[in-house]
Amino acid sequence: MAGTTHNFQISPSSWNSFEECPRKYWLSRQRLPRKASMAASMGTAIHNSVEDLCNFDFSDREDEEIGWLHSSCRETLQKRWEEERTLFSETPRHPRWKDESFSMALDGLYGAISILFDKAMLPLEELSSVTVKTWKQVQDIVVATEANLESKCGRLMGRLDLLIKDFEDGADDGLIVADLKTGKPPEDELSEKVSRQLLFYRDIMRENVTENQVLRAEGWYSSNNTVYRVEGPPILEEAIGAWERMKLTKTPFQATPSEDACSFCDWKAWCPSWWEAKYEGELSHEGMFRDEVVRLVRLDQESGAALFERTTPVGGDGELRVSDHRFGALLKGKSLEKIRQMDQSELDGYLFLGSIMFGGKTARMGDWSEILPWSPLLRSVRN
């Protein structure tokens, strides 16, 4: 599935990032400190565990053996969980690792297994009752796991979770391009981003199968065992058009601030546009969790009690001036550790505060929050 060599490729996630906000994509390519999230790490652990179970070696087991799947799920996930914990802690920006989320991850793994049983046209049994022979039947429908895809033109790439045989409608040569989702299922239909991802995978796969072969694209949500099928016209031509527009430049791409683009953006400490948009009223100042750009007025290093002064943007290049709006916050956990570790020169400058919890007389910052120097990036730092 290899194509022509190019100096860069785009994936569904990078394309989605560009479509949501071109500057967000540009910043993501500037080798800035990466941020880990518990949800992403948990999802990766589940994905890798599904792959392991789909490729499980039964050479030393009898077909009628039972009791192995239940224990193997936990053991496999535990191994992958520990791997993700290590990677998580090694990521420059990370909150607290939540061991209490392991049970949720295990439920997600069970949900993925349930969907595999359904696709194999097998009744779902108690995991402890599943025989080796039955699981081999599940394995038989799996054509590939975690497959690297690349378009013939070489500009597009991705990593497909599952490629499985499609027995629906009595077909015997159909295939399903499946992407396993471990997050919140949609209330109605798939989001534009997920649909784009699935059609992207489908169309690259279509370059590698026979013309008449049936090829479906599905999103599998393990939290509620629900499958969402996506249909639509080919999108590779559109993706190649995006590739042309995504060639990196020395100066930032245009920002398109919005609640969707900015709410969970990892790069706010380097982007002046969202703060200007917030000041202009284009983004909400409401909500229990808020981000701010501030000046530290004072800090009690022992108790974590801090007083901050909100800044006001001056133009669109990240210049700031102080305002008369001040608020107190109590810092604990990783937030207090972070601010204690910062150089005095950083503390004397402006700060980006991420995920401040408001809702009482005093705001709070904890393991879930971020404190970073305010560092608007106006020129590429790539060589």
Image (cartoon, rainbow, N blue to C red):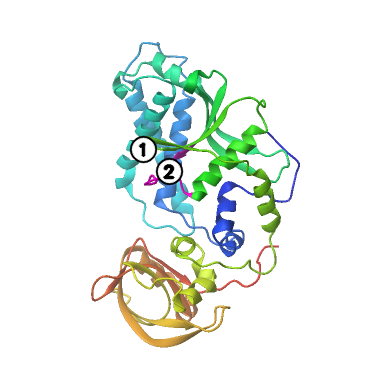
Q: Residue at x 54, y 41 (%)?
A: 198
Q: Main secondary structure of the magenta part?
A: loop
Q: Which residue is mark 1?
A: 108
The amino acid pointed to by label 2 is Gly
Disc 1 secondary structure class:
helix
Q: Is residue 203 left or right of residue 265?
A: right
Q: CA distance from mark 1 to mark 2?
A: 9 Å
- Please report the bounds of the magenta region as a residue range: 179-191
Q: Is residue 357 left or right of residue 377?
A: left
Q: Is residue 219 left or right of residue 336?
A: right
Q: Nearer the viewer, residue 154 or 227?
A: 227
Q: Which residue is mark 2?
A: 43
Name, please, the residue furthest toward the bottom. 324
Say which label, 1 or 2, has the lower sequence index.
Answer: 2
**In the rendered image, which quarter is residue 327 located in?**
bottom left
Check the picture and name the quadrant holding the N terminus. top right
Image position, residue 218 (x, y; %): 49, 36
